[in-house]
Amino acid sequence: MGKARHKKTTGVNIPMCVACVLFCLTLISIHMTSGFYAKYTVGAEGNDGARVAIMATDAEINLEDFCLAPGEEKEFTVTLTNQENERVCEVAQSYTLKVENLTNNLDFAYEYYLMDTGTMTIVDEATGIFEAGTAETATYKVKVLWPDVPQPANHAFEMDALRIVVHAEQID
């Protein structure tokens, strides 16, 4: 018996060769078609501009020495305007003025008076609208009342905090 010799042969991997050839053909065809479609390009140019409207609101609150005892009332004025630094608001806006009791330790009541042309009109809530492009002002007198009703003993040295909120928003 003779010795069998084994030869190492390296064969060609046919599926891998076919895949490489197909890949090369794909790259070539993509390159050729991109030049073909490049003939049909469209271009455009132009300019445009926009301007943002001015939204301006300002409030002045005159509030001095604001201490109350049961049965007392205090007033302060709030002046609202649709101007800021001499610039008039270019959009219509609505506004709301309210006084909030932050801690609710004490029972306060609030009254709002719209002061226009020297007369005072009682309003349920301080709301209004400023028209666009016209300088307008609204002055409110706000009265804070502390009813004279018997208070619990634990309210003897109680403090409360009030916040004056002016909310304005664009409506057009």
Image (cartoon, rainbow, N blue to C red):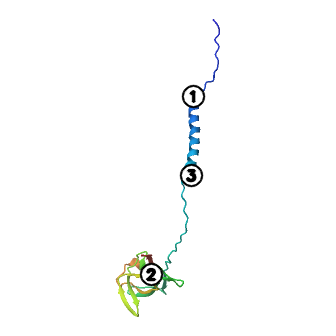
> What type is the residue that disc 3 sits on?
Ala
Q: Residue furthest bottom?
A: 118
Name the mark on residue 132. Answer: 2
Q: Is residue 68 above or below residue 31?
A: below
Q: Earlier in the sequence, mark 3 or mark 1?
A: 1
Indicate the position of residue 31 as horizontal and vertical percent values: 58, 45
Can residue 163 be seen in the rendering of this structure? no
Residue drawn at x 55%, y 60% as measured from the top left: 43
Which residue position is annotated with label 3?
Answer: 38
> Image quadrant for the C terminus?
bottom left
Q: Quadrant of residue 98?
A: bottom left
Q: Position of residue 73 (x, y in %)?
A: 40, 87
Q: Tell me which residue sits at (58%, 31%) in the image.
A: 17
**Direction from residue 62 to residue 121 in the image, left or right:** left
Name the residue beneath numbered marker 1.
14
Comparing 20 with 3, the one in front is: 20
